[in-house]
Image (cartoon, rainbow, N blue to C red):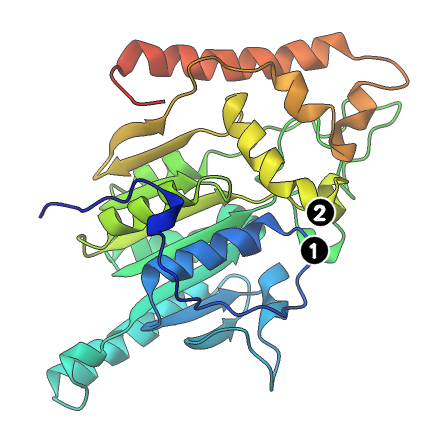
């Protein structure tokens, strides 16, 4: 099936399926991503929300969603999605629900559930080839409980549980898990990384995903002003800068075959991305930690060196 990709923001669907007035933090990058995701998905969806920051979005009797919404414990969202998908399929098979009334089942989680607490449940859903969408808003920590370390926290970031000090001047000493590759090892039909700074890319990724039955993953970089110690009005700029410096790669995989959807013509220094975030301030002041900065830049350079050796002809 030929996909009619859009080419500009003028072609993004106008209808809003996520309404304003939520209790989310000002400048939440994940909320902006979700807004575009729901534009792409339409209103015939049911969201299964794992405990996290976005639990606050729908609190009885108020909700910003036009669609149905189910709250689950942190580890259980894919299991909840399985129950809903099975129920819909049974109702359609028995003729109690018209096929045109079918719903897309969407799991919505933060990185804490996606990378850590809900990983076993997710792996089970992938193994069963559950037909669902999985959206992860990745702010690189457990955001709504004090910005603590998660499996998505990058090296040298300051969090509530990995503060820089005499024992660890760099802050976090572990490295961010590669959730994209964890999913890809299961060989699902479609997975992609996305960013609120590139809404056209988001819409086109969902258009591609629609043609596949089975698990579909979307991981979004999600600037978090309280946790990243940044200005709320600058969240989209940080999301774009993450791409421009190569820290966040925009890519997709169809049945395991990876393609980068955007490669910058010239990468900016990673330092440009780090230096304006409070969570990395300790590697610049009071003493500039050159070894730490070099290590981060080297990791990014090594990743793109591998990409460049495998890919060619990708538009920038």
Rendered-image quadrant of the C terminus: top left
Residue indicated by mark 2: 232
Looking at the image, is mark 1 or mark 2 earlier in the sequence? 1
Q: Quadrant of residue 160?
A: top right
Residue 7 seen: yes
Residue 26: image tag:
1
Q: Position of residue 61 (x, y in %)?
A: 60, 87
Whether residue 35 is situated above or below residue 315 in the rendered picture: below
Q: Nearer the viewer, residue 308 or 19?
A: 19
Relative placement, left or right, of 183 versus 138 is: left
Residue ID at (58%, 63%): 54
- Visible in this render: residue 117? no
Query: Is 281 or 237 nearer to us in this picture?
Result: 237
Image height of 256 relative to 2, above or below = above
State yes or no: discs 1 and 2 in contact (Cβ < 8 Å): yes
Residue 94 position, x and y percent, is 12, 88
Task: Find residue 188 and report its horizontal and vertical position in percent.
Answer: 25, 46
**Badge 1 element:** loop
């Amino acid at each position: 099936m030929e996909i009619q990709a859009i080419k500009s923001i003028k072609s993004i669907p106008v209808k809003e399926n996520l309404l304003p007035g939520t209790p989310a933090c000002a400048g939440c990058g994940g909320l902006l991503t979700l807004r575009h995701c729901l534009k792409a998905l339409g209103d015939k969806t049911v969201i299964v929300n794992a405990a996290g920051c976005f639990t606050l979005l729908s609190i009885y009797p108020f909700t910003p969603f036009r669609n149905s919404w189910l709250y689950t414990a942190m580890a259980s969202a894919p299991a909840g999605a399985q129950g809903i998908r099975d129920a819909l399929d049974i109702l359609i098979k028995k003729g109690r629900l018209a096929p045109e009334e079918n719903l897309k089942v969407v799991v919505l989680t933060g990185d804490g559930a996606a990378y850590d607490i809900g990983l076993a449940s997710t792996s089970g859903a992938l193994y069963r080839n559950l037909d669902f969408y999985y959206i992860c808003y990745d702010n690189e920590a457990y955001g709504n409980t004090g910005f603590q370390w998660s499996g998505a926290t990058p090296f040298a970031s300051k969090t509530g549980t990995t503060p820089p000090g005499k024992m660890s001047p760099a802050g976090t000493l572990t490295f961010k898990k590669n959730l994209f590759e964890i999913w890809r090892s299961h060989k699902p039909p479609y997975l992609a990384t996305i960013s609120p700074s590139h809404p056209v890319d988001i819409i086109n990724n969902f258009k591609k995903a629609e043609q596949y039955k089975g698990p579909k993953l979307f991981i979004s970089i999600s600037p978090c002003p309280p946790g990243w110690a940044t200005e709320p009005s600058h969240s989209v700029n940080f999301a774009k800068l993450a791409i421009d410096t190569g820290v966040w790669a925009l890519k997709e995989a169809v049945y395991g075959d990876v393609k980068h959807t955007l490669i910058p013509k010239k990468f900016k220094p990673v330092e440009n991305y780090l230096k304006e975030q409070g969570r990395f301030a300790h590697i610049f002041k009071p003493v500039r930690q050159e070894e730490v900065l070099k290590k981060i830049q080297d990791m990014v350079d090594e990743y793109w060196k591998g990409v460049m050796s495998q890919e060619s002809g990708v538009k920038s």
